[in-house]
Image: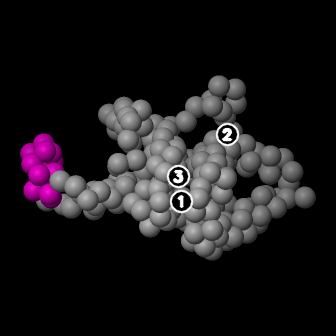
Amino acid sequence: LIAALCIHLGAESLVSRLVVPTENAPAPEVVSALLPGALDARPRAFSEIQDSLRRWLLAQVVREAEQALQSDPPEGAALERRSPCMQLLASLVQELLARASLCGHHRDAPNVALVRVAEDLLLGADEMLRKRLAPAATEAELARRQAQLSTTFVGSLVPWLIDSLALFSAFAFEYAQRLLPLVLPLLNTLKAVLGAG
């Protein structure tokens, strides 16, 4: 059910509304009334729901990356297969990039949401790698680890996002100020865990 919902939401236009703050968000009582009674949900601000969803997506892709690091690297068609959560997050980031590129100021809501998602991904990647991986001891282990990481958000979504922020944005300087303090520790961690040979 959750996988189907992720795929459905990822295919929707304006998927970035899942995380972009909005001025005309429904009141907490309205949101609560829309949910099935069986959920027994307390009234929550829409921004709180958005934050919860963003954190949940990050937790899911981190958990998927941890599982990928414990299994054999995928081969063939499995290399191209992405989980529903990864598909949703990639769709969300792609649309956020497009919306942010149309903004007139780096403090506009799509830019703020984009930076927040980028920060979450960078911090999540660094923390997960530091906790889960020791330095690769051999070239074979290094190749295996690179293959494992290539299908996770660390190997596919993070590099694409960083490139996109630098290449397609009018706010590259503002993004750099916010994100470089997070990129540098991640690069150091990657250097350590991929440091064979």
Label 2 Cα crowd, 10 Å radius (few <14 / some 14-19 / many 20+): few
How much space separates mark 1 and mark 3, taking CA atoms?
15 Å
The image shows residue 175, relative to residue 24, as above or below, that is below
Q: Secondary structure at mark 3?
A: helix
Where residue 115 sits: x, y (%)?
A: 50, 62
Where residue 113 sits: x, y (%)?
A: 43, 59
Q: Which residue is mark 1?
A: 118
For the point 41% across and 32% down, which residue is it?
11
Query: Residue 138 sits in which quadrant?
Result: bottom right
Is residue 120 something one can see in this rendering? Answer: no
Q: Which residues are magenta?
A: 27-42
The image shows residue 149, relative to residue 28, as above or below, that is above
Q: Secondary structure at mark 1?
A: helix
The amino acid type, in three-letter code, at marker 2 is Asp
Give the mark nearer the N terminus: 1 vs 2.
Answer: 2
The amino acid type, in three-letter code, at marker 1 is Ala
**Nearer to me, 180 or 101:** 101
Q: Which residue is mark 2?
A: 72
Q: Which residue is mark 3?
A: 101
| Tally of numbered tags | 3
Label 3 Cα crowd, 10 Å radius (few <14 / some 14-19 / many 20+): some
For the point 79% across and 50% down, which residue is it?
141
Q: Does the magenta portion include 29?
A: yes
**Nearer to me, 192 or 120:** 120
96 left or right of 164 in image: left
